[in-house]
Amino acid sequence: MTSVAAQKFSGQRRKMVEEQLLNRGIRDYRLLEVMSRTPRHLFVQESFQDRAYGDHPLPIGESQTISQPYVVAKMTEALNLKGGEKVLEIGTGSGYQTAVLSEMAGQVFTIERIKKLGVTAQRLLDELGYMNVVYKLFDGTYGWPDQAPFDAILITAGAPELPDMLVQQLKDGGRLVAPVGEMENQKLTSAVKCGDKLREESLGDCSFVRLVGRYGWPE
Ligand code: SAH
């Protein structure tokens, strides 16, 4: 990329962080720093690159979307990551949220059910040098039992309810963040596991593509 293009995108990134994240109350400074250098434009198709830092989701093919920057920030902030955690992500999609988690945590296990998206995201993240990410193509509602328990779990697709299998794979004191509710509209839900109880809190309304699978919505 020419340095002119690189400069244009870094300017757009700075503006995105200030106007969409800082101004709306995102306060995790490590996260703000990570999002101010993660090249979101590389995670969308070339024809959308000029809109990559806009205040909206964008299509990534296969009827799926890359989440709005603010939503990525809000979900990541809710996980309360300090740097050494083992994180499970369901719904790799474009890989953008994976990249942010890779910088914020110790190790990321990410699952995608659509092969084309999973393979493309893995190739890009490998190329960009995100080395602490492990990939799986599967129905993520089963979680990743061999690697459990996780300090944090993030579901980036809308679930009818919090999948039990995933709750079981969370450490005591661990956090799970997911959109939960109807097919079109959900509540962004943050849950902390306390022994055999889950302490849930709603972080507001959201609208995600569906979590499709055994413990999600039917195909
Ligand atoms: N974090 C991604 C969001 C992609 S959209 C990004 O910002 O790009 C949600 C993704 O979840 C889609 O790619 C979809 O295919 C995937 N998905 C839906 N149900 C799934 C399941 N059961 N297991 C794994 N991935 C799933």
Image: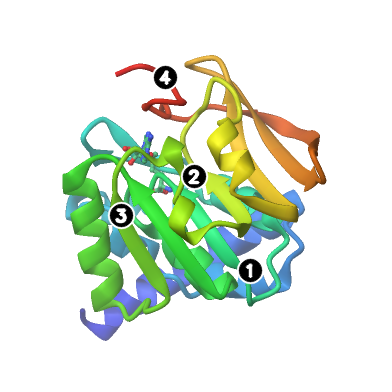
> How far across and how far down the image is residue 150, in percent?
60, 58
Please indicate, yes or no, whether residue 78 appears anywhere in the rendered image.
no
If the picture is divided into quarters, which one holds ligand 1? top left
- Disc 1 residue: CB within 8 Å of ligand 1: no
Total residue callouts? 4
Tell me the residue at 56%/48% (across/down). Answer: 154
Q: Which mark is residue 68?
A: 2
The three-letter amino acid code for the residue at tag 2 is Gln
The three-letter amino acid code for the residue at tag 3 is Lys
The three-letter amino acid code for the residue at tag 1 is Leu
Q: Which mark is residue 85?
A: none
Compare residues 48 and 183 and report the one nearer the observer: 183
Q: CA distance from mark 2 to mark 4?
A: 22 Å
SS of the residue under disc 4: loop
Going from the N terminus, do you reach mark 3 or mark 1 first? Answer: 1
Compare residues 173 and 17 and report the one nearer the observer: 173
Going from the N terminus, do you reach mark 1 or mark 4 first? Answer: 1
Give the position of the N terminus as an image quadrant: bottom left
Q: Which is in the foreground here, disc 2 or disc 4? A: 4
Q: Is residue 122 above or below residue 67?
A: below
Tell me the residue at 46%/71% (across/down). Answer: 11
163 left or right of 196 in image: left
> How far across and how far down the image is residue 40, in percent?
38, 62
Q: CA distance from mark 1 to mark 2?
A: 15 Å
Circles 1 and 2: CB atoms closer than 8 Å: no
Q: Which mark is residue 217?
A: 4
